[in-house]
Amino acid sequence: MDERRIGLALALRELGISGDVSDFASRLILQKTVYLIEEAGIKLSYPFNWYLRGPYSPALTRDLFDLASNREDIDGWVLDEHSRSVAQRLRPLISDEPDEEPAAKARRLELLASLHYLSRRRGVDLSDAEQATAQLALNGKHFSNAEVVAAIQRLRDVDLV
């Protein structure tokens, strides 16, 4: 297993996230989680581009399927202190909310990752939630202004914007 996949497996383990790729919601959760942890400072070097559901990395998809089918032992490997610190800082953002179904979690993480991506890579001003909501709609994302306001605050709470 190469270093990037080891790092991916360790980061997911640190966050308490399984590498389940058996359904669409699980894969969406993994894509958005890895995007957010990379942007927060865990350097796994996956390239992300905009796709139908926000930031997406084909290379990450390949590695996730590879990890799922080749359960190699990562015992003996550890994340560096900086990456562990980043993972702990993002846990509240990524962890399940009480009684949250996988589809709801996928939608929540899609919104968070999409807002971050549009802000950082397309210059969308997150200080104006109405503009951010409109930009999401222009990019095929339909979230309410209240959802956008709450998501922006959650990104601020973990210093991602």
Image (cartoon, rainbow, N blue to C red):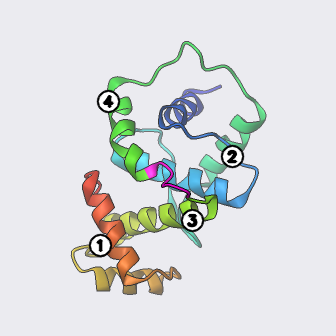
Q: Which residue is mark 2?
A: 62
Q: What's the residue type where badge 3 is placed?
A: Ala
Q: Which residues are magenta?
A: 94-99
Q: What's the residue type where badge 2 is placed?
A: Arg
The residue shown at (41%, 43%) is: 91
Magenta: main secondary structure: loop
The residue shown at (36%, 37%) is: 88
Q: Which of the 4 image quarters holds residue 79?
A: top left
Relative to the observer, which residue lies in front, 125 or 100? Answer: 100
> Which quarter of the figure is the N terminus placed in?
top right
| Alpha carbon distance from label 3 to label 2 | 24 Å
| Alpha carbon distance from label 3 to label 1 | 27 Å
Secondary structure category for the residue under label 1: loop
Lower position in the chain sequence, tag 1 or tag 2: 2
Mark 2 Cα shell of 10 Å, populated few (<14), some (14-19), many (≥20)? few
Q: Which residue is mark 3?
A: 104
The residue shown at (47%, 48%) is: 95
Q: What's the residue type where badge 1 is placed?
A: Gly
Secondary structure category for the residue under label 2: helix
Lower position in the chain sequence, tag 3 or tag 1: 3
Queried whether the magenta region covers residue 33, the answer comes back as no
* Residue 15 drawn at (x, y percent): 48, 38
Mark 1 Cα shell of 10 Å, populated few (<14), some (14-19), many (≥20)? few
Q: Tell me if residue 107 comes above or below residue 6 in the rendering.
A: below
* Residue 129 drawn at (x, y percent): 29, 80
Mark 3 Cα shell of 10 Å, populated few (<14), some (14-19), many (≥20)? some
* Residue 69 drawn at (x, y percent): 78, 36
Residue 82: assigned label: 4
Residues under numbered marks 1 and 4 in contact, where contact means CB atoms less than 8 Å apart = no
Q: Which of the 4 image quarters holds residue 65?
A: top right
Q: Is residue 47 visible?
A: no
